[in-house]
Image (cartoon, rainbow, N blue to C red):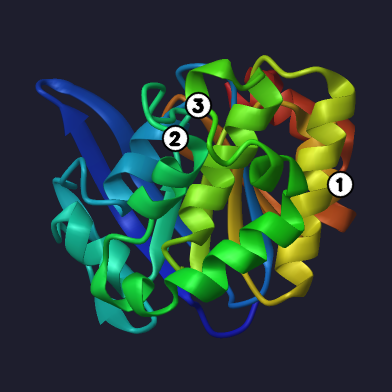
Amino acid sequence: MGEAMLEVKGINVFHKDLQALYDVSLHITEGSVLSIIGANGAGKSTLLNTIMGIHKPHSGTIHFEGEDITGMVTSRIAGKGIAMTPEGSHVFADMSVMENLLMGAYLPGAKKAKAEQIEKVFTMFPILKEKSSQLASFLSGGQRQMLAIARAIMMNPKLIICDEISLGLAPVIIQDIYAKVREMNQMGLTFILVEQEIKRSLRYADYSYVLLKGRVVMEGKAAELSRSEVEDAYFGINKYA
């Protein structure tokens, strides 16, 4: 896959006495799209939260652009250029769309590029410009997801991690959001997409990993992975159990 922008090596993560991740490793190169596929309980969110410093690994390392960020506090990791849109399109419901966007520009580096990033997200998501003074609580589910992604862009990141961005959305909205992800990727942004939906994960990614019960059980170039084999790995059928 080439030189890593983000490299996770052999991390083991526990929630108290329960082990959630077992010797997990992954690798993403700059300018690519990586998908992490797995059912509920596979360890996907734990992996993301560990990358972001919310969980601390018991062992293993995480490097971003060659720097060891293992166990670093979340604000410092964000400052290095990693943004995450959490599962459920969380936005500040009692704040306006514009106020939500400005919350994404709180880091010093992002503040300098605030005007430029506002222009970028309004060009990409014109509905947010139209509703910029409206409270986020009045947005539809798809619009809230767009706002969550736009807020991440406001951080002026190098890598965006998207956790289940299609959750609970209508197919036509999902298609639109993934088209925006592809557009942003073509503009140079690197993405990690965490999904349960196998077909979509393979379609939009360059490289994919399948998690099962906290372990990586399959990986490879997305275009070369067999959907049926990925489904077997996803459900733990035969040799993956």
Q: Which residue is rendered at x = 32% and y = 41% of the image? A: 49
Please tell me how crowded label 2 is: few (under 14), some (14-19), or many (20+) other residues with Cα within 10 Å: some
Residue located farthest toward the left when viewing the structure as drawn:
16
- In the image, which disc is placed on residue 203? 1
Q: Quadrant of residue 33?
A: bottom right
Please tell me how crowded label 3 is: few (under 14), some (14-19), or many (20+) other residues with Cα within 10 Å: many
Q: Is residue 66 left or right of residue 73?
A: right
Which of the marked residues, 3 or 1, is nearer the chain's N terminus? 3
Q: Element at badge 3?
A: helix
Q: Which residue is rendered at x = 11% and y = 20% of the image? A: 17
Looking at the image, residue 39 lies above or below residue 101: above
Residue 127 or 201: which is nearer the viewer? 127
- Spatial CA span between label 3 and label 1: 31 Å
| Amino acid under disc 3 | Ala
Looking at the image, residue 209 lies above or below residue 13: below
Which of the marked residues, 2 or 1, is nearer the chain's N terminus? 2
